[in-house]
Structures are given as C-alpha cells and as structure tokens.
Amino acid sequence: MNPGIICRGIVAASLICTAGLFAQKPADPEIERLNPADLPKLDYLSQVVKVKNGKKFLHIAGQTAINTKLEIVGQTVDAQADTALKNLDFALQAGGAEKQDVVHLNVFFVDSDGGAGKTVTSKIKAYFKNVPLPAITYLGVPKLVGDGMLIEIEGLAVVRK
Amino acid sequence: MPNHTRLLLRIGPWIVLGCLFVPPGTRAEKKKFTPETLFTSSDFNHVVVSDNARSLVFVSAQSAADESGIEEGLSLQEQTKRTLQNLKTALEAAGATPDDVVRIHIYVTNYQQMEGPIIGRQVRRFFNNHMPASSFIPVGSLYPKNSRVQMDAEAELEGQ
C-alpha cells in the first residue's frame, strides 16, 4: 500500500478522534446527574438530575414528527423519532439551550407491536451520545393527538445565557 | 412556685423567640394546598407554591425494577411498594426527602378503577399526607413491559 495513503489515513483518524474529544462537552457543575447505586443502572436515562437554582428554564412543548409543512415525516416510530429529535433541536436552539442543558424529558410513544420501547430508548441514547442524559419518563400510549403520529417528546432545559 | 415551673417561665420565652428567628433560607417556603374553589382530595393538592428554592431535582420515572429488572408476577400493591422505595432512594441521592417533592406523575397500565386506592394509600403514607401536586395517568404500556406502575417526581430544595 502507498505510504502516502497510510499517512493520510492516520491523519484523518486522529482528526476524527480529536473531533470526538471536542464533541464530549464538559459537564455543567450546576447540573448534577445522579445514578444512585441502589437503583438499576439504565443507559437510556439519568435517574436523578439536580439543578442549582438561579437558572432560567426552557419548557419545550411535545415535539413530534410534524414538519413546517404540517406533514408527518416517517411511517414508523424509528423514522418519526429522528424528525421529532430534529424538532427538539430546533426548539432548544430557539430557546438558547443545547442538548447538554436538557434536564428532563417525557417521551410518549405509540407501541403497536410491543417493540417501540426498545426503539425509542435506543434513539434517545444515540441523541444524547456525547452529553449526560436527562431524567426521562418513557410512556407507551394508545394514541397521540393526530392519526399517524407515533412519538412525542416534551422537555425541560436550563438556559445558561 | 415549684423550681421547674420557675425555670420554665424564665427560659420559655427565649425558646419561643428562638423558634421565631430561624435564619431565612432554612425555613421551608413550600405551600401545598387546595383552594376552596377546587374539590378536595386526600390523594393530592391542587396547588404547590414555593418561592425559596435553591435547587431543583428531577427524578426519572421509577418502577419496581431492581438491577435485574422487574420480577414477574408481582401484584400492583407490591410494585407500588418497590416503586416508592426506589423513589425514596432517588430523592435521597439528591439530598431530598418526600416532603421536598412538589409534583409527581403516577402512570399505570391496564388500570381498573378499583386499583386507585391500592396505589393511593401507599402514596399518601409515603408523603405523610402532605401531598404534592399530582397527576394520575392510565397509559397503554410502560417500559419495561411488565411494569404496571411508575412514578416520576420534581422536588425543590432550600439552600443547597
């Protein structure tokens, strides 16, 4: 193999690793995420989140897979979760907060085949991959407000600015 | 006049004064109540007001799970008991007690109306009848799937 290609490969790999380091944001000392040893360890939520006061809170309405053209994007919980989380990003951005500022979520999902819980928890896990997890309640519901809607995510974040 | 009565008369007023002058910030400012304009229930209060919170605590929905999940075949009563134990553990991790809780959600699957008191009785005992704002929400399913009841909570702490 051409040594130049190997060199470039190494440079690219180290760049990706460095980017990974930067993606892991430092934890906010004002927001403690607690997982007491006596409670089950779950990798898709933090059991307790404690926020020192003097904070401004951002309450985010239930985000769904509905886009600005009022279309439901995605036919499955899997696909709709992606759009709902993208919408959650927009909401956080509008309120001056970021992923790592989220302290609590309620995740409502329609569980038609019994497998939605697993799908949803892994989507959330992936979304918060590089930041600490908020306290989360996952709820399977018979239906959501509109026909065809399969997931809704409401949240609470602190605003630091 | 007996000696101890005299002593009590002498120090009594100071004890009363001492109780009045608890430094600000250490006295609970939470008011949990139900206004006359709303119906009264022993299961919850309609309104909770607090104006001296130094920190807020958010607790994920707790279930009857331990490290290996939820034991099969537990009664609703037993699941409720273990859920409340886990809730207590979670609150303690943040330095909070049931008294600091301002709001809970109670989620129940396959809910039958007669089951309300089974949960309500234990929840009332947990909060020693000082009930937070609360919502009781029957739901289609919970995760993990054999979970019949879950409770999440928000608490406020003074001076921490």
Image (spheres, rainbow, N blue to C red):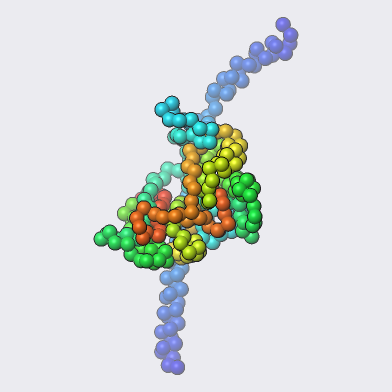
Task: Report the front residue among B80 and A51.
Answer: B80
Say above or below: A14 vs A63.
below
- The residue depicted at 50 percent of the width and 63 percent of the height is A114
- Residue A159 in the image: state x and y as whole percent: 38, 50
- The residue depicted at 64 percent of the width and 52 percent of the height is B74
Image-based side of A62 in relation to A136, left or right:
left
Task: Report the front residue among A74 and B6.
Answer: A74
The quadrant holding residue B126 is top right
- Residue A24 in the image: state x and y as whole percent: 46, 64
The quadrant holding residue A87 is bottom left
Work out whether residue A48 can be spotted: no
Number of labelled discs? 0
Which residue of the protein is positioned furthest toward the left in this rendering?
A69
Image-based side of A146 in relation to B10, left or right:
left
- The residue depicted at 45 percent of the width and 70 percent of the height is A20
Looking at the rendered image, the quarter that the N terminus of chain A falls into is: bottom left
- Residue B106 in the image: state x and y as whole percent: 52, 45
- The residue depicted at 72 percent of the width and 6 percent of the height is B1
Image-based side of A69 in relation to B124, left or right:
left
Task: Report the front residue among B29 and A119.
Answer: A119
Say above or below: A90 vs B2.
below
